[in-house]
Amino acid sequence: MAAPPGRALRVVLDPGVLICALLSPRGAPARLYLLWLGGEFELVVCPHLLAELEGVLRRPRFRDLVAPDEVGEFVDVIRQGAVWAENPVIAEAINRDPGDDYPSPWPRPPMSTTSCPGTRTSPAS
């Protein structure tokens, strides 16, 4: 999918996709992350999304998978390189985890219970 001529494609990636990009460097989420780093699209984040990303990656269950300094570097790259937007206003919770609710103009996909493909270990929810 290409952006209109003269305009960059802007993409919002769920924190779970970004987490998978860090944990599984050969998976599809990592390829998306690398495309963003290569300038193929603009990554759009808001304070809520970035706080969720960092908070989840700093949970004890991730300590064996990723070092705290690696988490900090990963989040800083996103913080410095992404396009910032305001936190969205959520009218009502639509996910099992209300912290995962983001407004979207597209229909909601079915709930998935799969983990990141290719991860060394799937953290328990």
Image (cartoon, rainbow, N blue to C red):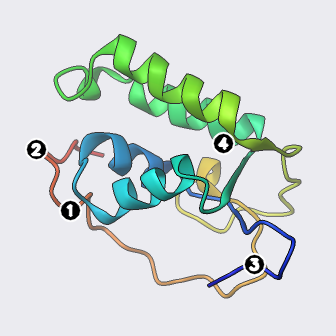
Q: Secondary structure at mark 2?
A: loop
Q: Is tag 3's residue or tag 4's residue first in the polypeptide sequence?
A: 3
The percent coordinates of residue 5 (x first, y second) are 83, 80
Question: Disc 1 residue type?
Answer: Pro
Q: Secondary structure at mark 4?
A: helix
Mark 4 packing: few (<14 Cα in 10 Å), some, or many (20+)? many
Mark 1 packing: few (<14 Cα in 10 Å), some, or many (20+)? some
Question: Disc 3 residue type?
Answer: Ala
Circle 2 is placed at which residue position? 120
- At 36% from the left edge and 49% from the top edge, which residue is drawn? 21
Mark 2 packing: few (<14 Cα in 10 Å), some, or many (20+)? few
Circle 3 is placed at which residue position? 3
The percent coordinates of residue 11 (x first, y second) are 67, 63
- At 58% from the left edge and 58% from the top edge, which residue is drawn? 13
Quarter of the image with the N terminus in it: bottom right
Q: Secondary structure at mark 1?
A: loop
Q: Is residue 61 above or below residue 1?
A: above
Q: Is residue 62 above or below residue 10?
A: above
Question: Disc 4 residue type?
Answer: Leu
Distance, label 4 to label 1, CA atoms, is 22 Å
Distance, label 2 to label 1, CA atoms, is 9 Å
- Label pair 1/3, CB-CB below 8 angstroms: no
Circle 1 is placed at which residue position? 117
Q: Is tag 1's residue or tag 3's residue first in the polypeptide sequence?
A: 3
